[in-house]
Amino acid sequence: MNEKKIAIMGLGYVGLPLAVKLSSNFEVKGFDISNKRITDLKKGVDETLEVTSSQLKNALKKKLQITNNLNDISDCNIFIATVPTPIDKNNNPDFKPLLDVCKKISKFLKKGDIVVFESTVYPGATEEICAKELEKNKNLLKSGVDFFLGYSPERVNPGDKKRTIDKINKVISGQNKKVELVLYEIYSKLTTGEIFLAKNIKVAEASKVIENAQRDINIAFINEVAKICSNLNISIYDVLDASNTKWNFLPFLPGLVGGHCIGVDPYYLSHKAKMLKVNPEVILSGRRTNDNMPKFIFKQIQKRLKNKAKILFLGITFKEDVPDLRNSKAIELLNYFKNSKFNISINDPFIANNSHIKYNDLMVKSFDAIILTVPHTFYKTKFSHIKQLLKKDGILFDIKGIFRNKTIEKYWSL
Ligand SMILES: NC(=O)c1ccc[n+]([C@@H]2O[C@H](COP(=O)([O-])OP(=O)(O)OC[C@H]3O[C@@H](n4cnc5c(N)ncnc54)[C@H](O)[C@@H]3O)[C@@H](O)[C@H]2O)c1
C-alpha cells in the first residue's frame, strides 16, 4: 500500500482534529452524515472549537476534502471510524452509529483495504460486531483475509489546549503485522508522542475503556468522601490538601461526571463483563455514586435557600471550556432547580441561547445565590465581580471549590 488515501468517518470532537492533522501528510476525505456539520466545516467553522478556522481553511486548501457524498470515499484504502458510541436508556451499548458506518464502508471495501476504529467500545467489539457488518459487502470480502482491521483508541481531551492529538501517546493495534506497520506509519505522522503497539485489538479496546472506567471509579470514591465530609462539617478540599502530602495518594477531585466518555464508557465495560458472567460491582457502583451527585448537590443547596430565591447558574456544559452539552450533569442539576420554586438565570460563555443572560448584562447585587457549576477559565478570573453580583446576604455555591481560598462571607463548596 504505497499511496494511502484515508477516509475519516464522523467529523466530531475526535474525527475533525484527526482529519485536519493527518491531511498534512496524507490525502484525507472527511465524511459526516450531518449536513449542518458539513456546511459549517466547508465554511471553516468548527462548532466544537477543537480546530481553528485558519487550521481548517488551510487544510481544505491542501489535502483535506470534507464531504457528505459517500461516493467521494470510494477510492480510499484506509477507513478510520470516529462515530459516537452512546448508550441507550437502559445503559446498554448502542452500536447503531458504528453499524451504520460499517455498512457505509463495506460498500467500498476492496482487497487489501484497512478499517480502523477509534470509537470507544468494549473489548471484542471490533472483531465480533464491526467485522460482521463489514463482511456484508457485495464482494464477500473476509476480514483478516481480504481486508484488515485495526483499532486505535482516541484519548483527546476536548477543551485541553495542551494535550492535543499531535502530542499525546497513541495506542495502536492491528489484525496482522502489515496492518500494525501501516498504522505505525500513519499515526507516527500524527503525534510526536509515543506510539504504543498493543498485543492485539482486544487489548487496545480494553486499554481505552478501562482508562475511563478507572477515572470514573476514582472520582466516585472522592464524591463519596465529599458526602461523608459534608456530614462531618469539614471541607473535602481541606482533607485532600492533607492527604495529598502522601507520596502515593491519588489527586482526584469531587464533582459532576457527565459527557459522553467517562459517564458512558464504564457501561460498555460492565456490559461485556456481564456477557462474560463477571459481576461488574465496582464499576457500576462508581456509576451510581457519580450519577447521584446532581441530586445530592441540589439537596445541599436547596436547604440553604429560601423559596423564590433568585439564583444565577454559571456554566451548564458538561465540563470546563467546551461547548458540549451532551449528558451534562450541570443541566441535570439545573433541572432540579427549575422544578422547584426558585427564580433562575443562566449564563454560559460557550452557549449562545436567547433565554440565557449575557455575562456583561448581569447586574450587581441582584442574586440571592450564585451556583458556579462549571468553572470555565473565563469565570476563574472574575471572583471579585462574581461576588459583587450577590445581594448582601447572598451565598456563593462553588461546586468545584475553585474560590475556596478567597474571602467571601457566605460560601459553600462540595
Ligand atoms: N470527545 C471526546 O472527548 C472523546 C475522547 C476519546 C474518545 N472518544 C470516542 O470517540 C468517538 C467519537 O466521539 P466524538 O466526541 O467525536 O463524537 P461526536 O458526536 O462529536 O462526533 C461524531 C460525528 O459522527 C457523525 N456520525 C454519526 N453517525 C455517523 C455515521 N453513521 N456515518 C458518518 N458519520 C456519522 C456525527 O454527525 C458527528 O459529527 C466515541 O466513541 C467517543 O466515545 C471521544
Image (cartoon, helix red, strand yellow):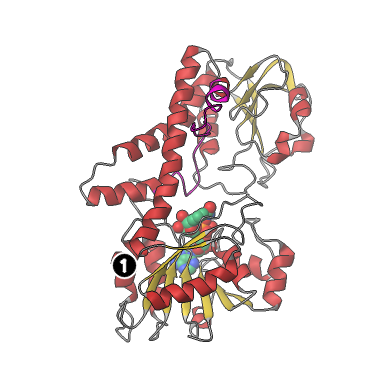
Which residue is rendered at x = 53% and y = 21% of the image? 239
Residue 263 falls inside the magenta stretch: yes
The picture places residue 252, in percent across and down from the top left corner, at 51, 34
Asked whether 399 or 243 is in front, the reply is 243
The spot of residue 247 in percent (x, y) is 52, 31
380 left or right, relative to 108: right
Residue 411 seen from this side: yes
* Image height of 90 relative to 207, above or below: above
Q: Nearer the viewer, residue 184 or 256?
A: 184
Percent coordinates x, y for residue 13 in the rendering: 56, 58
For the point 51% across and 35% down, the residue is: 256
Q: 373 above or below 115?
A: above
Q: How many marks?
A: 1
Quarter the C terminus occupies = top right
382 vs 19, left or right, is right
Extent of the magenta region: 239-265
Of residues 35 and 134, the one nearer the viewer is 134
Q: Magenta stretch: dominant SS? A: loop
The secondary structure type at the circle numbered 1 is helix
- Give the labeled residue for mark 1: 127
Residue sitting at x 35%, y 65%:
200
> Is 200 situated left or right of 70 in this image?
left
Residue at 74%, 23% (x, y): give it. Answer: 387
The quarter of the picture where residue 64 lies is bottom right
Residue flagged by tag 1: what amino acid is it?
A: Glu
> x, y percentage for residue 34?
54, 66
